Image (cartoon, rainbow, N blue to C red):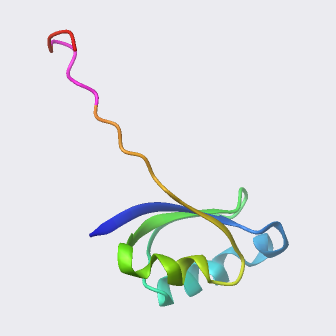
Amino acid sequence: MDQDITVTIEDAHQERTEAVADQLRAAGMQVRQVLPTIGVITGTVPESQRDAIVNVPGVAHVEAQEVFHIPPPDAGTQ
């Protein structure tokens, strides 16, 4: 199953954010968004490939994105 993740780039590698994104793609991540000014890359990765993502040079942190579901306004009290 694919997992939505947010990858934080190490400060020393922020000028290479696009190169890190290319390495993440090669490691199996589907990159959705590259935000070089804040050093963040978002996308999805199969759970089996997550360790490969963590070990890409320049990656400081990999975090699973939380998904919240809000009932419609006319739903009964929870």
User: Residue pushed farthest bottom?
Assistant: 26
Residue 47: percent from left, percent from top: 37, 73
Reply above or below: 47 against 64: below
56 w.r.t. 1: above or below: below
Q: For the stretch drawn in magenta, what is the main secondary structure? A: loop
Q: Residue at x 52, y 84 (%)?
A: 52
Camera-side residue of 68 and 25: 68
Residue 1 is situated, as x and y percent measured from the top left of the image, at 26, 70
Name the quadrant of the C terminus: top left
- Taking the spot 64% from the left edge, 78% from the top edge, the residue there is 18
Nearer to the camera, 36 or 42: 42
The image shows residue 5 at horizontal and vertical percentages of 47, 61
Q: Going by the image, does 69 lie left or right of 16?
A: left
Name, please, the residue furthest toward the right.
12
* Residue 71 part of the magenta-drawn span: yes
Q: Residue at x 58, y 76 (%)?
A: 54
Query: Which quadrant of the view contains residue 15?
Result: bottom right
The quarter holding residue 40 reads bottom right
Residue 17 is one of the magenta-drawn residues: no
Q: Would you place residue 20 above or below residue 66 in this image?
A: below
Residue 12 in the image, given as x and y percentages of width and height? 85, 73
Tell me how many marks there are.
Answer: 0
Residue at 28% in and 34% down: 69
Start-end of magenta stretch: 70-74
Q: Is residue 25 left or right of residue 1?
A: right
- Relative side of 61 to 74, left or right: right
